Image (cartoon, grey):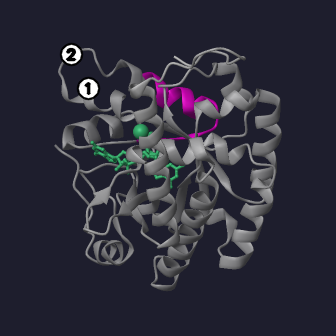
Amino acid sequence: RAKSIGFGQIIKYDPELAAITRDRAQRLGDLQLAVDRNQLEAHYQPLIDFKTGKPCGVEALIRWRRDDGELVPPVDFIPLAEYSGLIRPIGNWVAREAMMMARRLHAEGFDTMRVSINVSKVQLGADDFVASLTALLEDTGIAPEFVELEITESACDMGIDELEILLHRIRKLGVSIAIDDFGTGFSSLSYLDRLPVDKLKIDRCFITPLDDETDSSRIAELIVPLGHRLGMQVVAEGIETAKQAQKLAEMSCDIAQGFLYGKPMPGPELLTWLQNFTPIAAEQ
Ligand code: C2E
Ligand code: MG
Ligand code: MG
Ligand code: MG
């Protein structure tokens, strides 16, 4: 426990605290090195249109490929990147990769595919966020209508007025906005009505229970019409079984995402996946 330090005061050395600080500094150094050495990779998970049964987009998901080939998931380094501010260059990098991937997909004939990019509240809070986004759209030459930003309810922390203005500026560029992990945050429903949002992504924790015969499908059942009434499309995250997909289709959910269809994969693998895609028949 660090106390305020004045003359004559003795600072008690806390080995536990020192170890945590040392560990964090070490991990931050590692992450900085990973950025410098281009060890970050963007993987892409398909999104499927429930109506047509065909892929309509991909979500870019970042990974860190260590020297030994080990793939580090984002939960293990995104929080540190946010805390340290490294998320800004990292976020810029992944957005560029994703936009270039969309151009590649279009060139390969998948010319209606959109790309979704996760944006943390730390990135959104940067003064130059809209300017960077504009520059990336210009540099990569992707039409903004194929780009979507995923933000979480925690973005409301910056203040609802500021967020509303910011989202309108983003929308004005032609880029669309999705609320990620919907239902797990604490944003009020009046905010949701006020903010210019195109899609709601229902968190996986409301999708998994659809397998049960019990009453546990209630939340998903409520979110779909809520989104529709607010003029939004609804995406279901983390679909793993045909039964979940079937129930969501019956609820008129718009877009599906989950291991049932495809896991996040590197760009070249995604292209092969798309070329070999055959629509999954709904369970009878
Ligand atoms: P998210 O944006 O909600 O992404 C969905 C997560 O669910 C991904 O985990 C994805 O691999 C996983 N997922 C998808 N379908 C299934 C399924 O059927 N079953 C299960 N068990 N999981 C599924 P991932 O890639 O580990 O990413 C975790 C989180 O890290 C993301 O959650 C997002 O919040 C953050 N993240 C990932 N990439 C980025 C990035 O480029 N920038 C920022 N700021 N955050 C990122
Ligand atoms: Mg997401
Ligand atoms: Mg999510
Ligand atoms: Mg999630």
**Toward which corner of the image does residue 41 lie, by quadrant?**
bottom left
Q: Where is residue 176 in the image (x, y as percent from the top left)?
A: 66, 52
**Toward which corner of the image does residue 244 lie, by quadrant?**
top left
> Which residue is found at the position 34% from the left and 57% from the top?
53
Q: Residue furthest bottom?
A: 107
Callout 1 touching callout 2 (CB < 8 Å): yes
Q: What element carries label 1?
A: helix
Closer to the chain start, of discs 1 and 2, is 1
Q: Position of residue 81 (x, y in %)?
A: 54, 48
Q: What element carries label 2?
A: loop
Q: Mark 1 points at which residue?
A: 209
Q: Residues within 10 Å of mark 1 (few under 14, many from 20)?
A: some
> Which residue is found at the position 55% from the left and 26% from the top?
226
**Toward which corner of the image does residue 157 lie, by quadrant?**
top right
> Magenta stretch containing residue 262, yes or no?
no
Disc 1 to disc 2, how far (Cα)? 9 Å
Between tags 1 and 2, which lies in front?
1
Q: Where is residue 185 in the image (x, y as percent from the top left)?
A: 53, 24
> Which residue is found at the position 55% from the left and 76% from the top?
100
> Which residue is found at the position 49% from the left and 56% from the top?
29
Q: Which of 281 and 112 is in front in this view?
A: 112
Q: Which of 250 and 95 is in front in this view?
A: 95
Q: Which quadrant is the C terminus positioned in?
A: top left
Read off the magenta span.
222-236
With 159 as the anchor, is 189 left or right in this view? left
Residue type marked 1: Pro
Q: Name the residue under label 2.
A: 214
